[in-house]
Image (tube, rainbow, N blue to C red):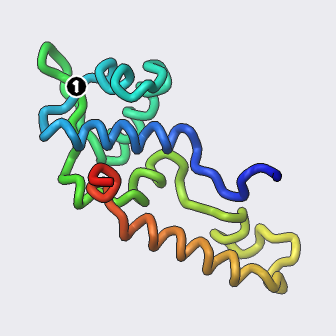
Amino acid sequence: MGDAMFSVSARTQYAIRAMAHLAGGEGHGATSAEIASAEGIPAKYLEGIMSRLKLSGLVESERGKHGGYRMIGEPEDISMLSIVEAMDGSVKPVNCVDAVGTCSQGNGCLPRQFWIGLKKAIDNYLEEHTLKDVTEG
């Protein structure tokens, strides 16, 4: 068998685990070292992930003795799509779904509508599921 047709990046998988960890903290937050240790995520790699989550408005950070990261909002209000897009941008099963003209076939590409439909289905699925769904199994 070949490689998976679609795959979620390690960065996104780690981001989801980090967000799930914060969701389980009952609003108390956690330091990146605590998250890295609990979730088995390389600490240096997690720093970049948390920075992206912060820039995307999904977490906030506080320095100091009682500092760390906290989610902005409740787990039921954070879509999986928002986490995926914070890490990897728009979901694209193929490169041509975002803009006409990126396909060598141009506007005459027959499968393009199929790929656009698949992108919409994936986006809808990720939008309909929240961090709460992930943390409650």
Question: Could you tell me residue 108's position as x and y percent?
Answer: 84, 86
Question: Could you tell me residue 111's position as x and y percent?
Answer: 78, 81
Count all numbered tags in the image, as a single digit.
1
User: In the shown orientation, is residue 44 left or right of residue 111?
Assistant: left
Which quarter of the figure has residue 114? bottom right
Check the image and name the residue furthest to the right. 104
Closer to us: 52 or 21:
21
Closer to us: 94 or 22:
22
Is residue 1 shown above or below 120?
A: above
Residue at 69% across / 83% down in the picture?
113
Question: Could you tell me residue 81's position as x and y percent?
Answer: 43, 60
In the rendered structure, which amino acid carries the disc numbered 1? Gly
User: In the shown orientation, is residue 99 left or right of residue 82?
Assistant: right
Is residue 135 shown above or below 133?
A: above
Question: Could you tell me residue 77's position as x and y percent?
Answer: 24, 60
Residue at 72% across / 58% down in the picture?
5
Task: For mark 1, give the secondary structure.
Answer: strand
Q: Which residue is mark 1?
A: 68
Is residue 40 shown above or below 94?
A: above
Which quarter of the figure has residue 130? bottom left
Closer to us: 113 or 98:
113
Residue at 42% across / 40% down in the picture?
15
